[in-house]
Image: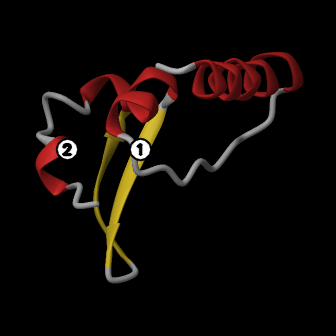
Amino acid sequence: MNRRKAFIGRTVRQLVEEMCLAVLLVEQYYDFTQAIANRYWVTSRGEIIAGSEGVDMDRDGLRSLIVV
C-alpha cells in the first residue's frame, strides 16, 4: 500500500475508533478496502447485490464482483 493510501487508512480508522463516527467509503481498490472495512456492500446498477463483514470479503468471493 502506498504512503497516501496508508495515511487515508489510518485517518479513517482514527475517526471510527476515537470519534465513534461511521464512515462510508466508496473505493475501487480491493486490497485497500479489505484492510480497513468493518462491513462492505457491493452495488450494481444502484442495487445492493452483496454485503457482509469486512473479514469475509475473500470467503464471499467479492473480488470476482469488482470490475474497474
Write the residue at 71% across / 29% down.
12
The crowd level at tag 2 (other Cα within 10 Å; few <14, some 14-19, many 20+) is some
Image: 15 above or below 29: above
Q: Secondary structure at mark 1?
A: strand
The disc labelled 2 sits on which kind of residue? Leu
Return the x and y of residue 54 as percentages of the image width and height. Answer: 38, 30
Along the line of sight, the residue nearer the viewer: 65 or 47: 65
| Quarter of the figure with the C terminus | bottom left
Q: Quote the CA–CA distance across marks 1 and 2.
A: 10 Å
Residue indicated by mark 2: 62
Q: Is residue 29 left or right of residue 13?
A: left
Picture quadrant where residue 56 is located: top left
Return the x and y of residue 38 as percentages of the image width and height. Answer: 49, 29
The disc labelled 1 sits on which kind of residue? Tyr
Contact, mark 1 vs mark 2 (Cβ under 8 Å) = yes
Image: 65 above or below 10: below
Residue indicated by mark 1: 40
Q: Earlier in the sequence, mark 1 or mark 2?
A: 1
Return the x and y of residue 58 as percentages of the image width and height. Answer: 18, 29
Q: Which mark is residue 29?
A: none
Return the x and y of residue 53 as percentages of the image width and height. Answer: 37, 32
Q: Secondary structure at mark 2?
A: helix
Q: Residue furthest right?
A: 19
Write the residue at 78% across / 18% down.
14
Write the residue at 41% across / 51% down.
28
Q: How many numbered discs?
A: 2
Along the line of sight, the residue nearer the viewer: 52 or 34: 34
Write the residue at 63% across / 50% down.
24
Give the colour scheme shown: secondary structure
